[in-house]
Amino acid sequence: MMTRRSLLEVATLGTTLAAAASAADLPFALPKLPYAYDALEPYIDGQTMQIHHDKHHQAYVDNLNKAVAGDPALSRLSVEELLQRLDSLPPAIRTAVRNHGGGHANHSLFWQTLAPAAKSGKPAGALATALDRAFGGQDKFEEQLRSAALGVFGSGWAWLSVDTGNKLILDTAPNQDNPLLAKRRPLLGIDVWEHAYYLKYQNRRADYLAAIVRVINWDFVSQRYEEMGGARRGN
Ligand code: MN
């Protein structure tokens, strides 16, 4: 016979399972961080990573799910596909997909392009060659990346992306605009929203930028470039 306590436990478990099931049915989900919150210390602190991932990124996911709720055709698309066809989406949800879909896509890539400093590596293969040609090498590229990111007015990102001619492009975008909106494929983005650095660096964005380039996951970015065909087309 069940006690009152165990009945309560079963009821609680039922509610938890129901919540998990309905979350699993939603089209978009928060990806797990590929390392511990504090893995990027001392460059990026654990509390910033936890709030940035668990709260800010989660909010983009939640709001993107709300935007496509009730539209099964849109719910079947990836977030990248939604951004690539933004102009053909129902006008009522375009801004939400641009902002929250952009936020979800940008942060999903961002976590993967970072790694603990001891594992951050160096640009390799075709990407190393392309960075040499386009920017004069890794150090000069990082200088230009930091300079571009420092120059973003307000909230936005600095982006290294690949254009339709397979050329490397370094530029910036406001808010959560993803390079896919400009027909470019993003390789690496640096988040310069204050939520990315304010707890540790306050107004010192330049110090944050000097730190974050120490934890770029060059193995991942180099591999991503290879998968985009950078080596084959000799960019
Ligand atoms: Mn962010």
Image: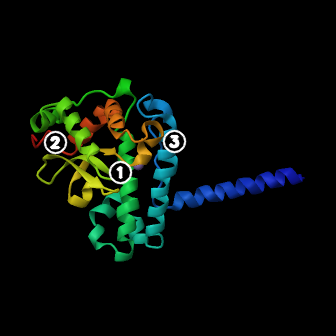
Answer yes or no: disc 2 within 8 Å of ligand 1: no
CB of mark 1 near ligand 1 (< 8 Å): yes
Real-space Cα separation, disc 3 to disc 2, in angstroms: 34 Å
User: Mark 2 and mark 1: span between their CA atoms?
Assistant: 21 Å
Work out whether 150 lies above or below 7. Answer: above
Closer mark to the observer between disc 2 and disc 1: 1
Give, as a three-letter code, the residue at label 3.
Gln
Label 2: which secondary element: loop
Q: Which mark is on residue 57?
A: none
Relative to 222, residue 70 above or below: below
Q: CA distance from mark 3 to mark 1?
A: 17 Å
Q: Are marks 3 and 2 in contact (CB under 8 Å)?
A: no
Front-lying residue, 161 or 25: 161
The residue most toward the top is 118
| Quadrant location, the C terminus | top left
**Residue placed under numbered mark 1 in the picture:** 106
Establish if 76 lies above or below 174: below
Q: Which tag, 3 or 2, sits closer to the chain's start?
A: 3
